[in-house]
Amino acid sequence: MEKTLHDLAGLLLDVVFLVKEDGQIAFVNPACTTVLGYEPDEMIGRVIQDFIHPDDLPRTRTEMAEVAGGRPGYGFENRYLRKDGAAIHFQWTAYWSPQDKLRIGVARDISERKRGEARQAALLALSTAAHQSDSLHSMFSAFDATLRALLPVRRLAAVLEPDDRLTYLSDGAGWAETDGWHTVPMSTPGAAFGQLRLDLNGTRVLQSAEHELLQFAATQAAAAIERFALQADLAHAARYDELTGLPNRRLFQDRMRLALARSRRGHAGGAVLFIDLDDFKCVNDQHGHAAGDQLLQAVAQRITACVREADTVARLGGDEFVVLLEEVSSLAKVQQVADKISKALATPLVVAGVALPASASIGLAMYPQQGEVMDDLMRHADQAMYAVKALRKAAHGRHGYPCLNADD
C-alpha cells in the first residue's frame, strides 16, 4: 500500500513532502527534482528547515506547529531555495497524520504568479512615483527601490539631455562612464529626454517581461520630466515677462514686499524708479510692432546693465519699466542711477538697421522717507515720472517729441 501511495505521488506535478515530527524529511516525490533541483536522496534524511528561505523560517515554524497540533493547513505560502540558490514560492496544503507520525504536505509552485503580482505592483509603484513625486530626484529614488526588488540592479543612473547631465545616481555609488550599463531611452512621441542606465553587474540576460518593465519605467519617467518642464515653464511665465525676460508686475511686487519688510526690520532703505519711454507709440506707428518689440528688449538690457545684480528691473507692461534699488539711503546715489539710465537710453538703438529713439522719463520715490507701503511708493514714483514727462514735453514745445525716422 505504501508503495502504491509513493507511486501515486510520483505522478503528481506538485511537490509532495512527508516530514517526521522532528522535521526530518521521510519522503519527497520526483517533482522535487523538477522544481527544486534536488534528487530525492539529497533531501531525504535532512530537516525540512534546511530548504526554507531564511526570511520565511519564523512564520513557517509557527505554521508547522499548528498543523502538528491538528489544524489542517490550506493556502499557506512561503519560499524555498532551489539547489542553484534561486527562491521558489510555494503554496501549501498540509495535515498531520497521527497514526503515521508524519506531516503530509503538497506544495504548488506559484513563483510565476508571484512574479506577475510583483510586476503589477511594480508598475503601480512606478506610475505612482512618476505622477506624485515632487522632484526628479525623489521620483528616480522611488524607481531605484522598485526596480531593485525585481532586478539585479547594482546601480541606477538617470542622464538627461542635453549634454548627458547626470540627474540621479544610486546613493553611495561612484559614477563612471562604462560600456557595462544597460541603457533604456526616456522619450515621449514628441521628445527625447535622456536615458535610464542600470548597472546589472553582468549577472544575466534580461527576460522579455523585465525589458517591458524597464521600458515602462522609462516611459513614465519621460512623461514626468515633460510634466516638470511644463510646470517650470508655467511658473516662469507667471512671474517673468515673455518679451524681455524681466520680472513681471507680480514678481516685482513680491520682491518689493520683501524689501519693505527688511527695511522695517532695521536694514537700510531703498528706492523705486518708475521709467516710461517717451513717445513709444510713435515707434510702433512708423516702424511696426516688431521693431517696437526689439526696442523694448534692447531697453531692458540697457536698464539692467545700469544697476547692481542685487537690484530688480521689471517690466510692468507696454513701455513701462520699474527698478527696485535696495540698501540705498542717499537720494544723490539714487539720482546717479537714474541719470545713468537716462544716459544709457539717450543713444538711439539700432534695430534692423534703423536708429530708433529711446529716451525715457524717470520718477523716483525713496523708502522709508516717502512711505513704507508699496502702493504709496508706486503712486509717488508714478507722479514724479509724469512731472518729469510734462517738463520734457514742455521743453519740446506743445507738440511734444518729434517722431524720428531712420533718416532724421
Image: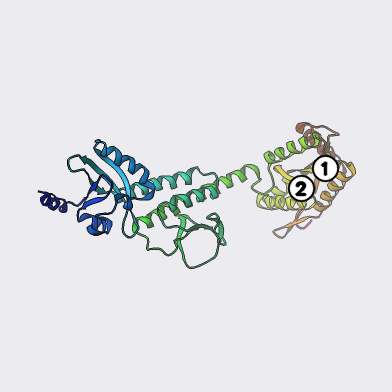
At a point 87% along the width and 47% down the height, the residue shown is 336
- Closer to us: 230 or 92: 92
Q: Is residue 47 left or right of residue 150?
A: left
Are dots 1 and 2 in contact, CB under 8 Å?
yes
The amino acid sitting under disc 1 is: Glu
- Tell which of 358 and 235 is nearer to you: 235
Above or below, 259 against 191 in this view is above
Colour scheme of the picture: rainbow
- Estimate the spatial distance between the alpha carbons at disc 1 and disc 2, rounded to whole Å: 10 Å
User: Looking at the image, can residue 174 be seen?
Assistant: yes
Secondary element under disc 2, as helix, strand or loop, is loop
Q: Is residue 400 visible?
A: no
Quarter holding the C terminus is bottom right
Q: Give the image quarter of residue 405.
A: bottom right
SS for callout 1: loop
**Mark 2: amino acid:** Ala
The outermost residue toward the right is: 332
Q: Residue at x 42, y 65 (%)?
A: 202
Residue at image x 25%, y 54%? Answer: 45
Horizontal and vertical percent position of residue 62? 33, 40
Seen from the viewer's position, the closer of residues 82 and 225 is: 82
- Residue 52 placement, left or right of 107: right
What's the mark number on residue 310? Answer: 2
